[in-house]
Amino acid sequence: MTGPDAGRIGEATVRRSLDDEHEVLVLVADCGPLFAAYLDHARRWESLPDGLSQTLMRQGLGAATLHLACRPRGESVGWTLHIPRPPTNVFLTGDSRSRTVTGRIFTENVRDTEQGRIYVQIARGDGTPLMSTVEIEGVDVLQIFEAYYRQSEQRPARFYEITDEEFVMFAGLPETDTEWLRDLPREQAIGIAGDGLRLLDEQVYRFQCGCSLEKILETVRTMFSERPEELFAGEAGVEVFCPRCARRWWVDRDDFKVTE
C-alpha cells in the first residue's frame, strides 16, 4: 500500500472505504511520513525516544489519526495513556477540522501506579469538553484504543497494524455484526482492507501541534501575571516549552507585558 504516491513528509493519507458485505467502515492510514516528522521533531526539541517509546508513539499516532478520520468535522480530542510498567505517559492530541495530530512521550517524573488508564477529553465547538477515563492493561496502544471504544464510545472498533507504517481501523456501524468484528483476525482484516472496497474518500492529516508564540504568551501570562519574577528570575527573557509537543519558544520580558 506504500509506493511513489505515499504521503509527503509529515502527512498521513487515510483512505476511507465501506465494506458493504460486513457493514463496517474501513479506514487505512499510511502514517510513515507522519511518524518520520515526529522523530525529526523529537530530535530537534528533546531527544530521540527509546525503542519502546517509539513503538508507543508510532501506534498512538496511527490510532489517533484513524479515530479522527471517522469523527465529525470540528472535533478535537486529547488522549493521555498512563502505562504503569515502565512508568510512561503517552500524550496524543488532534483536530478533525484542521486535520492535524501531534504527540509526546513522558518517561521521567511519571507517577508510579499499579493501574493503567487512558484519559480522554473531547471538545466540540464551544461546548463543555467531555471527559472519560478507562482502565487499561498492557502496552499495546491499538488494544488500548479498542478498550476505550468498548467502554466509552459504545460501539465496536478494531485496530490492526499492517506494517510498521500502515494501520487499519474497522469502525462498527449500526448494522455491524459485533461478534464477527470482535473475533476478526488480523490476517483476514488486512485481506478485507486491500480487497477492492467501495472507496468513500481520502483525507490527509499532518503532524502539527498548532502552538505559536502568541499562544505560549497567553498561557504564561495567565500562569504568572501576578508573579513575573518567578518566571524570569531577573533575566530579560526565558525559554518556554510547549507542553503538547515540547517545542521551545523564547519569551522576552517586554513581550510578556500586557499593553493597556
Image: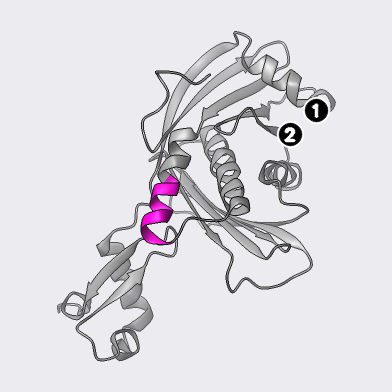
In magenta, the rendered stretch is: 38-46
Residue type pointed to by label 1: Thr
Q: Which mark is residue 178?
A: 1
Callout 1 crowding tier (Cα within 10 Å): few <14, some 14–19, many ≥20: some
In percent of width and height, residue 217 lies at 28, 70
**Of residues 197 and 97, which is closer to you in this image?**
197
- Queried whether the magenta region covers residue 193, the answer comes back as no
Label 2 sits on residue: 156
Label 1 close to label 2 by CB (< 8 Å): yes
At 29% from the left and 66% from the top, the residue drawn is: 249
Picture colour scheme: one colour
Q: Amino acid at mark 2?
A: Pro
Q: Position of residue 160 (x, y in %)?
A: 68, 31
The picture places residue 218, in percent across and down from the top left corner, at 30, 69
Residue at 71% x, 51% y is 139
Identify the residue at image location x=70%, y=33%.
157
In the image, residue 227 sits, relative to residue 202, either above or below, namely below
Element on which disc 2 rests:
loop
Residue 89 image point, x, y percent: 61, 61
Front-most of residues 55 and 74: 55
Going 70% across and 63% down the picture, which residue do you hit? Answer: 86
- The reply to whether residue 250 is in sight is yes
Q: Residues within 10 Å of mark 2 (few under 14, many from 20)?
A: many
The secondary structure type at the circle numbered 1 is helix
Can residue 123 be seen? no
Q: Earlier in the sequence, mark 1 or mark 2?
A: 2
Q: Does residue 31 lie above or below 249 as drawn?
A: above
The image quadrant that residue 172 belongs to is top right
Marks 1 and 2, how far apart in space?
A: 7 Å
- Specify the quadrant of the image occupied by residue 18: top right
**Prevailing secondary structure of the magenta residues:** helix
